[in-house]
Amino acid sequence: MYIRKAAQHGGVDEYMYIVGGMIKTMADADIEDGCIRIENGKIAEIGRRDEVEFHPAAHEPVIEIKHGIIMPGIIEAHCHMGITEEKKGMEGDDCNETVEPITPYLKAIDAINTMDAAFDDAVRAGITSAMIGPGSSNVVGGQFAFVKTRGRRVDDLIVKAPAAMKVAFGENPKVNYSGQGKSPSTRMAIAAMLRQELTRAFAYEEKKRKAECSGEDFEEDFALECWLPVVRREIPLKAHVHRVDDIFTAIRIAKEFHLKMTLDHCSEGHLIADELAAEGFPAIVGPDLASRSKIEVQNMAFKTVGLLNQAGVMTAITTDHPVSLIQSLPLCAGLAVKSGLALEEGYKAITISAARICGAADRVGSLEIGKDADIAIFDGNPMEVFTKTLYTIIDGQVVYDAENAGEGKGGK
């Protein structure tokens, strides 16, 4: 199935070559019998084998693929791995600060434990980056971060932080705070509280801007400074929405304040697909592999992402780990394809579309010169259940090798 001519682990190789197989660039056409040259963690050259200068020195690693798929590392566009750790109960659950409904100043990077087993599971599945952040118990939950999936120190894994501001509509904030005897206990209160907070944020931004222009002293407010990237449209609101009415409320507020936004979960999006396409906000759909555990997800189905995509909505797919396990992400894409999503769009939903939605397409999501050498190599279509991950490469370093991991070569 494949041959390793040389290998180097424990550091970023100055040069690496991947030759053979079919390269799915997710930028241009697929390349049969291709070659990728990696230099200092970046893609330096890509094309057909006979188009790329291929003269590796004896010490330079070469991965040769006889039959298989070479593609961008898979991207999880919404999850909580490392924040809600597996098998650790309350001690390992840092997902929701459930005492105040407005907590925009919380940063995911302060709670991500890279030692969570989910990171290793992600790498073994060819997942090289993920958008990680707080849960949905609060009206405003805090700041998401887009990170790579292999390393010990989260600071070294950051691609973008903050990458989005989490807000939530519907059942979760209602259930959490109505039990505490305080707002919000209705959908009206959720919307009102978010509007109030955004009004404060815009007023703060205007006051700071005027002070900077005039040279006046300005005392920064920690609880509002975190809103500036949102107000300035540098990052989106990341809106937890399942039900049709919640989706439209999120859109209404985003338009009122002229904000960027992603529609996360979007479980009833297929019921209003044409309206969502006209609005232009992207959707991160899932976790459709999970159970219908509450009222607002009663219409959850794998067909949603395909119907939204066909209508013209940019779509990605999420496991919402640990709601469903992160290693199931490519299989979730396969189930979406089975339910009507076009095959090529299935690939996009876990690579380039996910990267664009997460604001990281300048670094990851496609195999192009200058981008990070984040690459997943499979013995077949990763959306099929029997397909094996052969290699996972992050920043030009082999971080998973099926042969050395003792999992055999597999192959077709």
Image: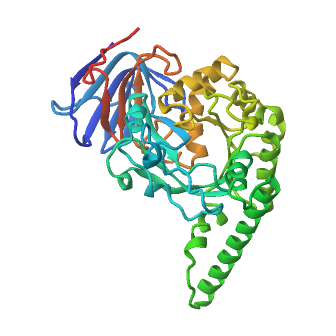
- Looking at the rendered image, the quarter that the N terminus falls into is top left
Residue at screen point 49% across, 26% down: 24
Task: State the image coordinates of residue 70 (x, y, percent, origin top left).
Answer: 43, 25
Q: Which of 252 and 189 lies nearest the eye of the viewer?
A: 189
165 is higher (above) or lower (below) than 124: below
Task: State the image coordinates of residue 369 (x, y, percent, origin top left).
Answer: 43, 41
Q: Residue furthest top?
A: 412
- Looking at the rendered image, the quarter that the C terminus falls into is top left
Please state if 253 lies on the left or on the right of 49 as rendered. Answer: right
Task: State the image coordinates of residue 157 (x, y, percent, origin top left).
Answer: 39, 50
Q: Which of 43 and 405 lies nearest the eye of the viewer?
A: 405
48 is higher (above) or lower (below) than 87: above
Residue at screen point 74% across, 47% down: 170
Coloring applied to the structure: rainbow
351 is higher (above) or lower (below) than 92: above
Q: Which of 173 and 17 lies nearest the eye of the viewer?
A: 173
Total numbered circles? 0
Residue at screen point 33% across, 27% down: 18
382 is higher (above) or lower (below) than 266: above
Task: State the image coordinates of residue 376 (x, y, percent, origin top left).
Answer: 41, 29
Please identify the quarter of the rendering in which residue 348 is found: top right
Please state if 90 lies on the left or on the right of 275 as rendered. Answer: left
